[in-house]
Image (cartoon, grey):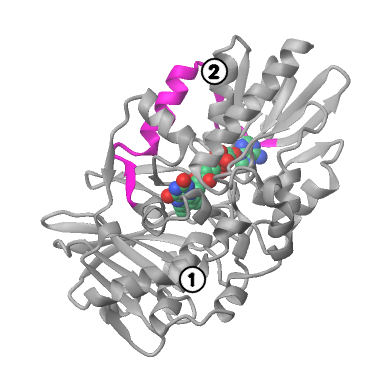
Amino acid sequence: MSTQWDVVVVGGGLAGITAARDLKQRGFNTVVLEASDRLGGRTYTIEDEGCTVELGGTWIYWNQPFIWAEKERYGLAIEETPGCVAEHIAIHRGDRIEALAADEVGEFMAGFDVFFSEAIKVWERPYDAKHSWEAIREREAITVADRMASLALTPLQKAAIGGFLEILSMSAPSSASYVEMMRCYALCGWNTTVFKDTAARYKFADGTGALVDAMVRDGGFDVRTSSPVTAVNQQGDGISVQTANGDIHHGRLGVITVPMNVMNSVAFHPPLSPIKQEAADVKHAGGGSKVFFVVKGDPGPVMTLARSADSALIGSFTYHRGEHQSLLAGFSLEPDALDKSVEEWQSIFNDYLPDLEILRTFGHPWGTDPLSQGSWCSYRPGTVTRFAEALPLTEGKLFFASGDHGDGWRGFMEGAIASGSQTAMAVLKTLSRD
Ligand SMILES: Cc1cc2nc3c(=O)[nH]c(=O)nc-3n(C[C@H](O)[C@H](O)[C@H](O)COP(=O)(O)OP(=O)(O)OC[C@H]3O[C@@H](n4cnc5c(N)ncnc54)[C@H](O)[C@@H]3O)c2cc1C
C-alpha cells in the first residue's frame, strides 16, 4: 500500500499527537504512524479494579503552561495524590529507618536549598539555556553524586534529598546530571514546595488517557496503530516512510517523535547528523521502574524514601486510598523490580511501614519495552548542552519533536506537548512557503 500525505508523523505519544492535531486543524493532511496498538506512548492509563492508574507519565502542575492549557481547553479534572502530602514519612538514613519527626521537616526541606544554592545563577532562565550557557557548560560534567559529596549535608538530608533526586532522575547519583536537576528546580521558581508538588501532587482524575482521547478526537488526523516504522527516506520532492508490514507513506514533510533511546530502530536515509546519532547511541540515563503495590485496607497518606545504595525501594507513597484496599506507587532502580515476588517486597516494606500488607504488585517494563527502552528523559552528565541544542534541529524534510529534547520541561509530558506544538508551527511555516 502506498499513500500520500502532507505530513507523516512517526510516533503517537503526546509530542506526535500534538503536532498532528495542530497540523490537521490548519488543513494539512496528516497521519500518525504508531508502532504500538495504542496511542499515548510513555503515558499509559489503565483501570485496575475500578481505580484509574497511570503506568507512565502522571503528574502535572500549573507551572507547566502547555499541558495545563490542554487540561483547561478540554475541561479535564485533576485530583490530588494522597501520599504527596504524607502524614508519615519513613526515611532510610543509612544505618536505620526512622519516621520523619515534625521538628525535622525544616531540616529536610533546607537540604534542597543547600543542594540547589546556585540554581538561580546557573538557570536564571530555565527556558533559555543560552542566557547562562557558560555557567551550565562549566558544570555539565558534574554528577549528582559529585554535588552531594561536596556539601556538608546532615545524614537526614543526604538520605532524603538523595532518594528524591534518584526518583527525579530515575538513575543512580553517579549517572545523574547536576545541571539537569537544577533545571527542574529552576522551572519550579526555585521553590522547594512547588518542586515537591510538581513532582507528584496533581494528576488527571480520568487519566492521561482522557487527554490523549480528547486531543485525538479534536485533531481529526489519520492514525495507523500497529505500524512500526522501519525506514525513513528523504528524496528531492519529499519523504517516504516504510512500516514493518510493508506499507509506504509518502509525505511532503515528516515529524519524527520516537524516543531518543529507540531512535536506532529506524533506518534514516540519508543518515541522521552525527550528534543525533551519538545521542541515539549514548541514550539518556532515565531507567528504573514504577511499581504499584495493591495493599490491604487504608494506610493513610504515607511515604517512604531511600537511596538505591540502601534499598530496592527508593521511594513510595499512597496513590489511591480505599476502605478495603489501597494503592501505593513506588520507584526502584533494580532491573528485576517488576519480577520481585510479593514476599520479597513485603519484607522490604516491613522495615518502613510494618503494618502494610501487600496483596499484589504490577507495572509496565519501560526499560525493556522496545518502544521506549527507558523511562523519562534524563541527560547523562557531560551531554546536556550539546544534546539539548542539537536534537530539535530540522534535517532536510524531517522535523524532530519529543519530550526528550528542547528547552524547559524536557523529560516531562509538558515538554512533549510544547515540542509537538512548536514543531507543528515550524512545519506550517515550511508548508506555507513551499
Ligand atoms: C514511568 C514513567 C513515569 C513518568 N512520570 C511523569 C510524570 O509524572 N509527569 C510528567 O510530566 N512526565 C512523566 N513521565 C515522562 C513523560 O511520560 C514523557 O516525557 C512523555 O510522555 C514523552 O512523550 P513523547 O511523545 O515525547 O514520547 P513517547 O510518549 O515515548 O512517544 C513516542 C511514541 O513513538 C512510538 N514509537 C517508537 N518507535 C517507533 C517506531 N519505530 N515507529 C512508530 N512509532 C514508534 C512509541 O510507541 C511511542 O508511542 C513519565 C514517564 C514514565 C515512563
Question: In terms of depth relative to the viewer, which is nearer, 42 or 233?
Answer: 42
Residue 239: % across, % down = 79, 24
User: Is residue 54 left or right of 273 when viewed as pictured?
Assistant: left
Tell me where the magenta segment starts and ends, as one range: 201-229
Question: Marks 1 and 2: CB-CB under 8 Å?
Answer: no
| Image quarter (top left, top right, bottom left or bottom right) of the N terminus | top right
Q: How packed is label 1: few (under 14 Cα within 10 Å), some, or many (20 or more)?
A: some
Outermost residue to the front: 121
Which residue bears the numbered disc 1? Answer: 114
Lateral position of residue 29 relative to residue 249, left or right: left
Q: Residue at x 45, y 67 (%)?
A: 112
Say which element carries label 1: helix
- Residue at x 26% of width, y 79% of height: 350
> Residue at 62% across / 76% down in the picture?
146
Q: Position of residue 220 (x, y in %)?
A: 50, 16
Residue 201 x/y as whole percent? 33, 51
Tell me the quarter of the picture where residue 340 sits.
bottom left
The image shows a total of numbered marks equal to 2
Q: Nearer the viewer, mark 1 or mark 2?
A: 1
**Rendered view: 82 above or below 330:** above
Q: Amino acid at mark 2?
A: Phe
Quarter of the C terminus within the rendering: top right
What residue sits right under mark 2 in the picture?
A: 221
